[in-house]
Image: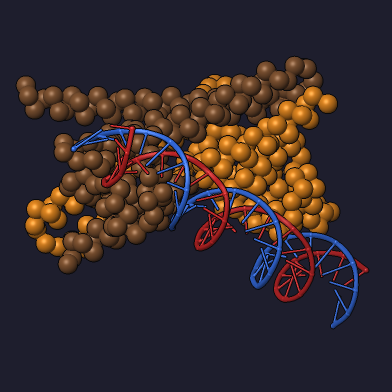
Chain colours: A orange, B brown, C red, D blue
Amino acid sequence: MELKEAKDRFIHTWGTLATQWGINRTMSQIHALLLLSPKSLNADEIMDELQISRGNVNMNLRDLMSWGLIYKQLLPGERKEYFQAEKDIWKAARQIGRERRRRELSPILETMEDIKKQVKDTSPESAEFLKVVNDIYAVAGFADNTLDLVTKAEESWLTSTFMKLFK
Amino acid sequence: MELKEAKDRFIHTWGTLATQWGINRTMSQIHALLLLSPKSLNADEIMDELQISRGNVNMNLRDLMSWGLIYKQLLPGERKEYFQAEKDIWKAARQIGRERRRRELSPILETMEDIKKQVKDTSPESAEFLKVVNDIYAVAGFADNTLDLVTKAEESWLTSTFMKLFK
DNA sequence: TTGAATTTTCAAAATATTCTGAAAGTTTTC
DNA sequence: GAAAACTTTCAGAATATTTTGAAAATTCAA
């Protein structure tokens, strides 16, 4: 079974790659599994497929929802909760960008602002220190803006391209 | 001592922020310490300042050099190696962008290309799978390009601004 | 050369993170 | 309202990462 192998490899590799950039392996694997699954899956199916515990599945599904990468789905006639990945990868990427902005850049901006306020004196040493703080603030702000800009540009480009199909 | 406190807070916070985005705390703290230090420091001074072991200092200095964020400096008449951070934060940020591109995006691109090759059959299931793989490839490629573009644009903007000072 | 100064390595210890599984909590059905 | 079906929580276990410190390797001056 050729395709099954490729899918497994995808899921496995995705998990490994994720750890490289500070994301939990299991979370990535669940995300990959849902991305590849044509139908939405429930906790038991995920446990079974990835051979992990219920608690682990539950916790990581919660995390993935907080990233806006998967949705909970309630199927009629079913007690269990089913989960589905955002299949539009571009949308998912924008979501990741938005969250990383919020989780990584915002704290830097806040902290630098805070530290700036803390230093009151006007010695040359303080000025030198504040230069570093200000520069980091500026760089983080630039990154934040650029990411926002690119995300929005990409979105409207996609939208306009899509809209043209109906003209 | 007001300034010392602020510096310590900066170093400490920088370390904590770093762990949030998958970077080793000590590595970030050493980087912060060197960023704030007017003169370059040797291993003993860093050990002393951050209260960490020699092996730890050595390993993280090596890592920071591989990121291109600090330089080794050989002072005349000194046996010890001294280390200095890249003080131009914009340059450092570009360096981080370049490395993250290489370490995070390149592996995704490579893996997706590889997996594409692996799937030979033409069933609808395979097609569906390949669509996901292709989409991820496209998104990663877009991010890679954009990051490169923004970095270069930012660099030349700075350069041209700087050059104007001499006109 | 030699040996003192310094850097690097790496096995073991410490710490941090992730995972498990069973108990507690919730929701739905009858 | 009670029991069944399911989800959530969380303390302890397992795993992974980071750190230590002493030994090995390297460098350099004499």
**Residue at the image position 52 percent from the left and 45 percent from the top:** A22
B149 horizontally vs B143: left or right:
left
Residue B126 figure quarter: top right
Q: Nearer the viewer, residue A9 or A103?
A: A9
Q: Nearer the viewer, residue A24 or D15?
A: D15
The correct choice, above or below, for B6 with respect to A149 in the image is below
Q: Nearer the viewer, residue A77 or A18?
A: A18
How many numbered markers are drawn? 0
Most extreme residue toward the left, as rendered? Answer: B167
Residue B110 in picture, x, y percent from top left: 57, 24
Q: In this rendering, does residue B110 appear at all?
A: yes
A94 horizontally vs A56: left or right:
left
**Residue at the image position 44 percent from the left and 30 percent from the top:** B101
Figure quadrant of the N terminus of chain A: top right
**Residue at the image position 33 percent from the left and 49 percent from the top:** B30
Residue A27 in picture, x, y percent from top left: 63, 47
B99 horizontally vs B41: left or right:
right
Figure quadrant of the C terminus of chain A: top right
Q: In this rendering, does residue A75 appear at all?
A: no
Residue A118 in picture, x, y percent from top left: 21, 63
Residue A33 figure quarter: top right
**Residue at the image position 12 percent from the left and 54 percent from the top:** A125
The correct choice, above or below, for A37 with respect to A131 in the image is above
